[in-house]
Image: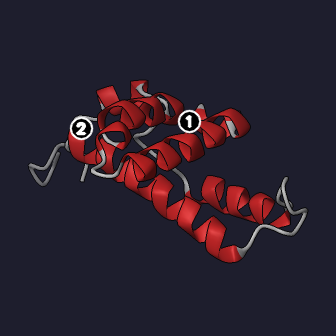
Amino acid sequence: MDRAVFIDQTQAKRITFGEHIEDYILSVSRHRPSKHSGLCEEQRLRRFRKAEVALCAYSVAHPQPEHFEDYRDRRLLQTSSKSLKPIAPGTVKRELTMLKRVLDHKRRKLGLL
């Protein structure tokens, strides 16, 4: 405020990451040019939302890197349900990139970027 730059974060503080994921699915994922890619993205986001209840409860206004680092570390220790092989680092990186797109979308929408 001293620098005459004020960004109102009230709305962002009221919206949880989980709520925003649902909004992203409805407004972005379902409107992808390729129905297959939109469906895959929607399934990944719904799986994330179901598995990461604690992370989805946080506000969109102030995502903390530690929360996503914990997610990354836990995910790298998991095994695939189909092949029982460890989750590949590339898979986790793609998941984190998708989550970043979700966060950036909301932050742009709310004028926080």
Q: Find disc 1 in the rendering and name its residue.
A: 58
The answer to whether residue 28 is left or right of residue 52 is left
Determine the image quadrant of residue 89: bottom right
**How far across and down, in percent of the image, does residue 27 sit?**
30, 34
Could you tell me which secondary element the residue under label 2 belongs to?
helix
Mark 2 Cα-neighbour bin, 10 Å: few <14, some 14–19, many ≥20: some
The answer to whether residue 65 is left or right of residue 24 is right
Determine the image quadrant of residue 109: top left
**How far across and down, in percent of the image, does residue 45 sit?**
55, 43
Give 100 or 33, whichever is nearer the viewer.
Answer: 33
Give 14 or 20, whichever is nearer the viewer.
Answer: 20
Q: Residue at x 44, y 57 (%)?
A: 100
**What amino acid is labelled 2 in the image?**
Leu
Label placed on residue 31: none
Could you tell me which secondary element the residue under label 1 belongs to?
loop
The answer to whether residue 22 is left or right of residue 29 is right
Q: Residue at x 38, y 37 (%)?
A: 24
Q: Find disc 2 in the rendering and name its residue.
A: 110
**How far across and down, in percent of the image, does residue 113 sit?**
24, 54
Mark 1 Cα-neighbour bin, 10 Å: few <14, some 14–19, many ≥20: some
| Lower sequence index among marks 2 and 1 | 1
**What amino acid is labelled 1 in the image?**
Tyr
Q: CA distance from mark 2 to mark 1?
A: 16 Å
The answer to whether residue 20 is left or right of residue 74 is left
**How far across and down, in percent of the image, does residue 59 sit?**
48, 35
